[in-house]
Amino acid sequence: MTIRISTRGVAARRAVAGLIALALAVSAGVLGASGAARAEGEVPAPATGSTAPLTASLVSVAPAYLTPSTSLSVRVAVTAGERALTGVQSVVAITDAPLATASAVDAFLDQPDRVAMREVGRGQPAEFLQGVPRAPGSLDAGSAATTSLLISSGSLNLPRGTSGVYGVSVTTIADGVPAVRNAFVITWTDSVMPPVDVAVLATVGGSPERATALLNAANDYRVALAVDGAVLPLLDPHIADLTGREVFAIPAGHLDLSSAAHADAGGLVSFAVQRSQSAGEERPWLAVPGTIDQAVVDLADAQGAAAILAGTKLEFGRPEAAGSLAAATASSGRQVPIAMAHSRLSASLATSPTTDPTAPARLVAETALLSLDPARIGRGEPVLVAPGESWIVDGTRPSDELAAMYSAPWVRPAQVADVLASAPAEVQVATLAPAMGDVAPEWVDAIGQHVTRLADLAAATDQPQLILDGPGRSLMAAMSLPMRGDAEARDEAVAAALDEAKATLHSVRVTSRSEVTLVSSSGKIPVTVRNDLPASVTVVVAMTTASPRLLIDEQPVATLEPGTEQTVFVPITAVSSGNVMVSVALRGEDGSALSSSQAFKVRVRAEWGNVATGVATAALVVLLIAGVWRTIRRGRRDTRIGPMPSEPHGRADAEAQR
């Protein structure tokens, strides 16, 4: 067989291969040239995980707002990376025009390089580092320095007779490295700005340490407080003194009212409100839910809340109302006020890190935007600022942001009562909010039952706070509003709190388990009870039986010292013989159940006692008869007349003659 090979096909394939090789070569050359161009024209980025060649952060910004008589002071901390830097300087620029809206402020802070700006000043790091001189604008590898800039009103050159919010950028540059830009907003005022009435409501709750930090941050008489009163006795009395302040109560543990409303747990809410009020004078209370729907409105109405607060943690159901106060109709027909915290102001105050030097100026700028908003001018209604329990605070001093806000001439302090007294906008609420963030209803029910039992046990002790502030508070804290943000952690906290509550309730119990035999028609049954609490407890030993063979004559009261066991005797009367099951439980003196019941058998053998009594009686009768018989026989023997003895006649005659 002859095989022919087509030379035309081979040539074609060779030609194609050559073209491909040529294309690859050209492509490689082009790509190589392009890469070389980038290498020559750009500063190489630092390798992943390496130190940035230049870092810069703002240390301080002052004042919180500008006037014609003030200068802008900015301090920048600059740090060199792994190599020395030259030509280091910070450049300050300000926007050409004011930022008229909140969205314009957000856009500037997000991308300050996209807004038209003009330079107003620049400066270099200090020329001395720990007393050692260095070249201007230079930084050794790994060293840090501070650049201080003071820009006069004239250099700022802002338009006189006007007011507005401006954007400021601070760009730090150095030779051969990428620039670092920081930005903030600041208010310029050289005109009379319309006043803004601002009411601030700080929520105080959580652990004693957290509550102390929040009270320190809100240590200003102009700030109203929404307080978990149950935590106040755990604080320093000086810090917990709220004399002269506008104060509202919130349920103990900052209870998640949405979960309670959807589980129909009005009793739990009532207890939490009373617990919060128990530490001091009764105050109006605010319902702070995670969602707002008809169930929450009805709960707030039924429990007598002064208002519902639509705060920073609200997930669903914020009313569509322009003002700070709305009103929803409860099923009872009554109107329930809904106080609405201003979203931007509240978030600005709540979420700004305490280390952010631009935060005071930002909060002041937000109030300035409200003052200059044409839609608000002339309305005069107060604005509510409520940072909530998640407010980021220093914890050792009053809030710098609030101090700056109150210093603004257009801000007028108001009270929360002013907000609640304003004209509400009537709104419709959803029938039922999504329950995705709720505690499971069965757990809400379990928490309610255990809280009630713990309260009953606490009332029977001489130190009720040990239980109420211990496992009782843990239960409600596990179901708190702040825990809605982490369902997994909340579920773990609920399970742990329920276990702690069960262990506490088991501390006072009946330990008798053996059978008891009763051999008479009446007697006392011994019952052993134990108290493992660190406090004394007074209990009623309540014995019951369904059998007609046994009557319980009395329910004795006993006081058990901490860590002791005691035997208590329960008087009973047996009607007839037989085996009887009795149940013993411990109750408070008010009748509340303190322990689960313990059942054991009583063997009633009343006839044994009767037989024994009969035998003893018969024996006594026999002994009595025998004694009488012996006495009689002895008496008869003594009274018999025997023969008279003879006497001499002489003596007898002599006696007769006498």
Image: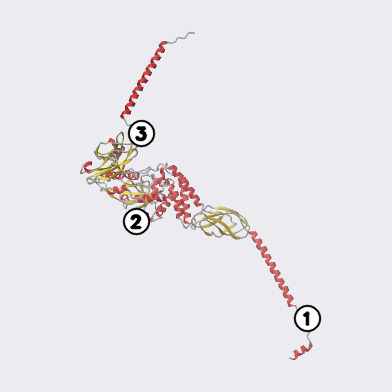
The residue closer to the viewer here, 611 or 101, is: 101
Where in the figure is residue 140, as x and y percent of width and height?
32, 38
Q: Is residue 54 above or below residue 625?
A: above
Read off the residue under disc 1.
Answer: 643
The residue closer to the viewer here, 587 or 371, is: 371
Tell which circle, 1 or 3, labels the residue nearer the N-terminal end.
3
Q: Which mark is residue 574?
A: none
- Could you tell whether 382 is left or right of 564 in the image? left
Read off the residue under disc 3.
Answer: 46
Q: Secondary structure at mark 1?
A: loop
Q: Which mark is residue 243?
A: 2
**Mark 1 nearby-residue class (10 Å; few <14, some 14–19, many ≥20):** few
Q: Would residue 306 be visible to someone looking at this image? A: no
Tell which circle, 2 or 1, labels the residue nearer the N-terminal end.
2
Q: Secondary structure at mark 2?
A: loop
3D distance between C-alphas at marks 1 and 3: 151 Å
Tell me what residue is drawn at x 60 percent, y 61 percent: 522
- Mark 2 vs mark 1: give the one in front: 2
**Which residue occupies the extreme left position in the image?**
160
Tell which circle, 2 or 3, labels the residue nearer the N-terminal end.
3
- Could you tell whether 643 is left or right of 502 in the image? right
Where in the figure is residue 27, as x and y percent of width and height?
35, 22
What's under tag 3, amino acid-wise?
Pro
3D distance between C-alphas at marks 2 and 1: 116 Å
Quadrant where the C terminus sits is: bottom right
Q: Secondary structure at mark 3?
A: loop
What's under tag 1, amino acid-wise?
Pro
3D distance between C-alphas at marks 2 and 3: 58 Å
Counting labels gives 3
